[in-house]
């Protein structure tokens, strides 16, 4: 079985690569796009994640490689340190490159070796791609009155997410797919309401934030993971509209 098969038990030490990639996303990939066009959102790319095309350029991670595509030329470099990654993409490492983050990522030592495992990196990219696919299905079921945001990978959280529902009616929530964090150690899907919800409802099971989670381990037991994921999101959406 491939080590990058999304629907097999997770490998040990996935969290180490996840933390390293989070640093690369926040301090290297997103700043390259932001400095060029004033936007920072990322998306799944081949074997990883990266920027949408901006001015003929794509900055991305492919397994354990950094890839810079520009005007038909492709440059690559092995992931080593945060500083090296930032310099590869945009010429400099800067801790504070956007002033309005509510919860900016705490930087690691920018000169420490990251030790990204190629297969683990691809697996995380596959999870983000899965999240994007299901979230786009969810967005397609929005009804009149819903405010629907684009799906993107947020660099400060390193998760794929969209926002859906009416904030004025108290029905809006963030719907996302995280590769894991300090609160939930494995990849998971989540629904995070923007307003009050019925905390007595067992659906709202998250312990590290106000909302609901469905973990990778729980999805492993499903015959159709995509349908189960969409049902999870729809259950949260329907509860908030009830």
Image (tube, rainbow, N blue to C red):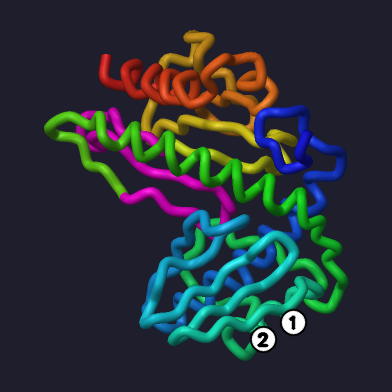
Give the residue at mark 1: 84
> Which residues, given as a range, are shown in magenta?
150-174
SS category of the residue bearing label 2:
helix
Residue at x 65% of width, y 77% of height = 95
Residue furthest to the left: 144
Neighbor class of circle 1 (other Cα within 10 Å; few <14, some 14-19, many 20+) is many
Find out whether residue 112 is within the magenta segment.
no
Measuring from the top left, give residue 91's x and y in whole percent: 62, 90
Residue 193's quadrant in the figure?
A: top left
Q: Is residue 211 above or below residue 154?
A: above
Measuring from the top left, give residue 223's x and y in whole percent: 57, 15
Give the residue at mark 2: 87
Q: Which mark is residue 183?
A: none
In the image, 50 versus 210, the foreground residue is 50
Q: Is residue 125 left or right of residue 167?
A: right
How far apart marks 2 and 1 lie (CA) works out to: 5 Å
SS category of the residue bearing label 1:
helix
Q: Are marks 2 and 1 in contact (CB under 8 Å)?
A: yes
Residue at x 48% of width, y 61% of height = 42
In the image, 211 versus 186, the foreground residue is 186
Q: Is residue 38 left or right of residue 154?
A: left
């Amino acid at each position: 079985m491939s080590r990058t098969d999304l629907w097999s038990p997770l490998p040990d030490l996935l969290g180490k690569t996840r933390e390293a990639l989070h640093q690369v996303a926040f301090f290297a990939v997103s700043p390259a796009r932001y400095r060029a066009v004033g936007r920072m959102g990322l998306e799944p790319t081949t074997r990883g994640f990266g920027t949408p095309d901006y001015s003929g350029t794509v900055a991305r991670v492919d397994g354990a490689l950094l890839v810079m595509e520009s005007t038909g030329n492709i440059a690559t470099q092995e992931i080593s340190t945060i500083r090296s990654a930032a310099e590869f993409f945009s010429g400099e490492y800067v801790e504070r490159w956007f002033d309005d983050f509510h919860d900016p990522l705490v930087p690691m030592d920018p000169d420490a070796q990251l030790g990204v495992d190629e297969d683990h990196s691809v697996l995380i990219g596959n999870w983000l791609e899965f999240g994007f696919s299901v979230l786009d299905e969810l967005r397609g079921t929005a009804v009149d009155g819903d405010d629907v945001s684009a799906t993107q990978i947020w660099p400060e959280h390193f998760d794929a997410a969209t926002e859906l529902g009416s904030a004025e009616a108290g029905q809006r929530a963030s719907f996302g797919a995280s590769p894991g964090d300090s609160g939930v150690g494995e990849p998971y899907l989540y629904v995070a309401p923007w307003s009050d919800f019925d905390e007595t409802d067992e659906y709202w099971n998250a312990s590290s934030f106000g909302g609901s989670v469905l973990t990778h381990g729980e999805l492993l037991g499903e015959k159709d993971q995509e349908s189960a994921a969409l049902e999870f999101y729809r259950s949260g959406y329907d509860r908030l509209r009830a």
